[in-house]
């Protein structure tokens, strides 16, 4: 199988930047210094979150798959193929949303756009990954786990 390295671009970072600017503007109108400092802190935190969630990269690293948001590499994981017992493409529930989150009955999901997800099964749980090319990612992981 050829090398897999895909970047899925999202739009949530734009919402976070706009929210950050609005919070900064509101903080300028607050006469209480403590409130202003708190809102500036929230604004900076949202800006950092926006900088870390502009895209989602999924990359084959030989013995593991890398999943990470960027460009600020705060949220990332490396998953050994040896831990994966099964892989499949699944439809994301309509109310699942986007981002990095855990949902009861669904488990962890990391995606940056709506659309299909790749479900990685482990012995004890599942993990869902968004991908710009889910069929190719499923094929890659299947080839890696079947060659064990």
Image (spheres, rainbow, N blue to C red):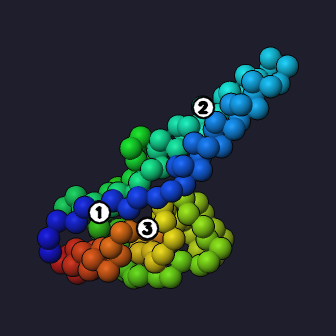
Q: Quadrant of residue 57?
A: bottom left
x and y, in percent, of residue 145 in the image: 26, 76
As drawn, is 110 to the left or to the right of 136? right
Image quarter (top left, top right, bottom left or bottom right) of the N terminus: bottom left
Q: Is residue 75 left or right of residue 132?
A: right
Marks 2/3 in contact by CB < 8 Å: the verdict is: no
Give residue 105's quadrant in the image. Answer: bottom right
- Marks 3, 1: nearer the viewer: 1
To which residue does mark 2 refer? 44
Which residue matches tag 1? 6
Give the percent coordinates (x, y) of residue 30. 83, 24
| Marks 2 and 3, the one that precedes in the sequence | 2
Label 2 vs label 3: CA separation? 27 Å
User: Residue 133 at x, y = what percent?
Assistant: 32, 73
At x 40% / y 47%, what residue is drawn? Answer: 70
Which element carries disc 2, helix, strand or loop? helix
Q: Residues within 10 Å of mark 1 (few under 14, many from 20)?
A: some
State the image coordinates of residue 144 (x, y, percent, origin top left): 22, 74
Residue 114 visible to an observer of this rendering: yes
Query: Sequence order check: which comes first, mark 2 or mark 1?
Result: 1
Q: Gap between marks 2 and 1, in whole Å? A: 29 Å
Q: Residues within 10 Å of mark 2 (few under 14, many from 20)?
A: some
Q: Is residue 9 above or below residue 129?
A: above
Callout 1: SS: strand
Q: Is residue 33 above or below residue 141?
A: above
Quadrant in the picture for the C terminus: bottom left
């Amino acid at each position: 199988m050829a090398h897999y390295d895909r970047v899925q671009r999202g739009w949530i970072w734009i919402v976070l930047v706009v929210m950050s600017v609005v919070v900064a503007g509101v903080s300028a109108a607050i006469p209480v210094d403590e409130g202003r400092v708190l809102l500036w802190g929230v604004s900076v935190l949202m800006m950092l979150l926006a900088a870390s969630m502009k895209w989602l990269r999924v990359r084959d690293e030989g013995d593991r798959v890398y999943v990470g948001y960027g460009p600020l590499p705060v949220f990332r994981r490396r998953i050994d193929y040896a831990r994966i017992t099964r892989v499949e493409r699944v439809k994301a529930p309509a109310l699942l949303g986007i981002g990095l989150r855990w949902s009861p009955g669904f488990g962890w999901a990391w995606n940056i756009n709506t659309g299909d997800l790749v479900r990685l099964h482990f012995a004890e749980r599942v993990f869902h990954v968004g991908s710009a090319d889910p069929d190719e990612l499923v094929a890659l992981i299947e080839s890696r786990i079947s060659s064990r």
